[in-house]
Image (cartoon, grey):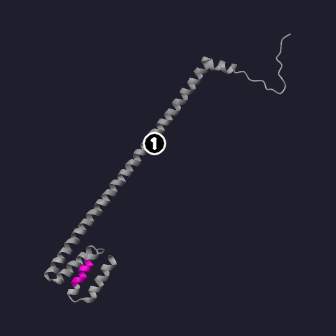
Amino acid sequence: MAKTLHKPPGKKQQRSAQPLRKLWRSKVFWRVACAVLVVWAVAWGSSAWQTRAALRRKEREVLARRQKRRQQEEARQKKKVEKQEEAGASWAVHMSRGDAYAGDGEYDLAADAYREAIAIGPRLAPGYANLASVLLHLQRIDEAIAASEAAVATA
């Protein structure tokens, strides 16, 4: 009679790790596992490579757009600065001319020069202040007050 192992009541029988060890040690398992890994790596790698290439292309496009915007902004700034320098230079020229005329006592010519400076730089208070000063010398009180108020408003 064969001996049978009796399982005590209430206890579960433990599984044997023997079949897993056999599978783990078999050459077929490792060949199949390696084949699966190679297929997975090739499939993932090629799609990842395509994704990386697309990302690089997109990044180059974004950088090109940023560079183009930067160049356009620099060109706009340069034009703006040139325009301001041109306006500022001519404003300064008219202000200097008005100062020279006022220094020589030619108040009518000085008033005209200051008016031209105000036309170029209407937000610059010194033009209005100098015009008011010259108009006081010419006894044009109402115009001088208006020019003074404009100088205070722009300051």
Q: What segment carries the magenta color? A: 127-134
Q: Position of residue 141 (x, y in %)?
A: 26, 89
Which amino acid type is marked by label 1?
Leu
Quarter of the view holding residue 90: bottom left
Q: In this view, does 127 lie to the left or right of 22?
A: left
Residue drawn where x is 42% and y is 45% of the image:
59
Place of residue 126 in the rendered image (x, y in percent of width and height, measured from the top left)? 26, 76
| Residue that extends furthest to the left in the rendered view of this protein | 104
- Mark 1 Cα-neighbour bin, 10 Å: few <14, some 14–19, many ≥20: few
Provide the major secondary structure of the magenta segment.
helix
Give the number of marks: 1
Residue lying at 27% horizontally and 73% vertically, measured from the top left: 121
Residue 132 lies in magenta, yes or no? yes
If the image is split into quadrants, where does the N terminus sit? top right
- Which residue is situated farthest in the top direction here? 1
Which structural element holds mark 1?
Answer: helix
Q: Would you place residue 118 above or below residue 48 in this image?
A: below
| Snapshot quadrant of residue 39 | top right
Can residue 118 be seen here? The reply is no
Residue 73 drawn at (x, y percent): 34, 57
Judging depth in this view, the residue of 61 and 118 nearest the camera is 118
What is the x, y in percent for residue 80?
Answer: 30, 63
Where is mark 1, residue-wise?
55
Residue 18 figure quarter: top right
The answer to whether 67 appears left or right of 43 in the picture is left
Please check the rendered image and state whether residue 83 is part of the magenta-colored stretch, yes or no.
Answer: no
Q: In this view, does 78 lie above or below 126?
A: above
Quarter of the picture holding the C terminus: bottom left
Q: Residue at x 28, y 59 (%)?
A: 78
Residue 83 visible in the picture = yes
